Amino acid sequence: MSDAQPVTATAARWLAPAGVLITGAALLAVMLRPAGERGLMEGGVAYAIVTYDLVLPLVGLGVALTPMTRWQTILVAGIFIAGIPWGS
């Protein structure tokens, strides 16, 4: 028998670190641009990065989603995304 792992197991191994690296590079690019040259979206991202009161709840949400199954995580993410327009 072959000891090969399923494709999904190997993809899960490198997909999360790759996503973190890509996101980190994008955030670094936003933060390195001068504040006067940032657009509306970049300014909002930069503000969210440097203010803990906006970032810590998202970190808590990530920690809470960790033990959940894939479908529970998708459901919570969908509810979170759907609730953004109605948030204050």
Image (cartoon, rainbow, N blue to C red):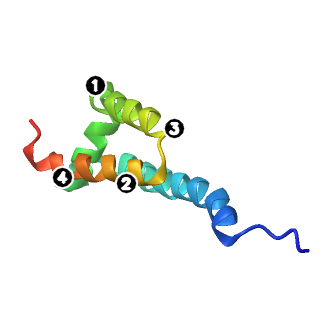
Q: How many marks?
A: 4
Q: In the picture shown, does residue 81 fall above or below 53?
A: below
Amino acid type shown at disc 4: Ala
Q: Label 2 vs label 3: CA separation?
A: 13 Å
Q: Label 3 vs label 1: CA separation?
A: 24 Å
Q: Which residue is mark 1?
A: 53
- Pick whichever of labels 3 and 4 is earlier in the sequence: 3
Q: In the picture shown, does residue 55 fall above or below 80?
A: above
Question: Residue sitting at 32 percent across and 51 percent down?
Answer: 75
Q: Which residue is mark 4?
A: 82
- Pick whichever of labels 3 and 1 is earlier in the sequence: 1
**Do the numbered discs 3 and 1 sit on residues whose CB atoms are within 8 Å?**
no
Q: Position of residue 20 (x, y in %)?
A: 53, 51
Amino acid type shown at disc 3: Pro
* Mark in front: 3 vs 4: 3
Q: Which residue is mark 3?
A: 67
* Mark in front: 1 vs 2: 2
Q: Position of residue 7 (x, y in %)?
A: 68, 71
**Do the numbered discs 2 and 4 sit on residues whose CB atoms are within 8 Å?**
no
Relative side of 56 to 44, left or right: right
Amino acid type shown at disc 2: Ile
SS at mark 1 in the image: helix
Amino acid type shown at disc 1: Asp
Q: Which residue is mark 2?
A: 74
- Graded by Cα atoms within 10 Å as few (under 14), some (14 to 19) or many (20 or more), the crowding at tag 2 reads few
Q: Position of residue 49 (x, y in %)?
A: 34, 37
Q: Which residue is outermost to the front?
A: 1
Q: Which residue is outermost to the top?
A: 53
- Pick whichever of labels 1 and 2 is earlier in the sequence: 1
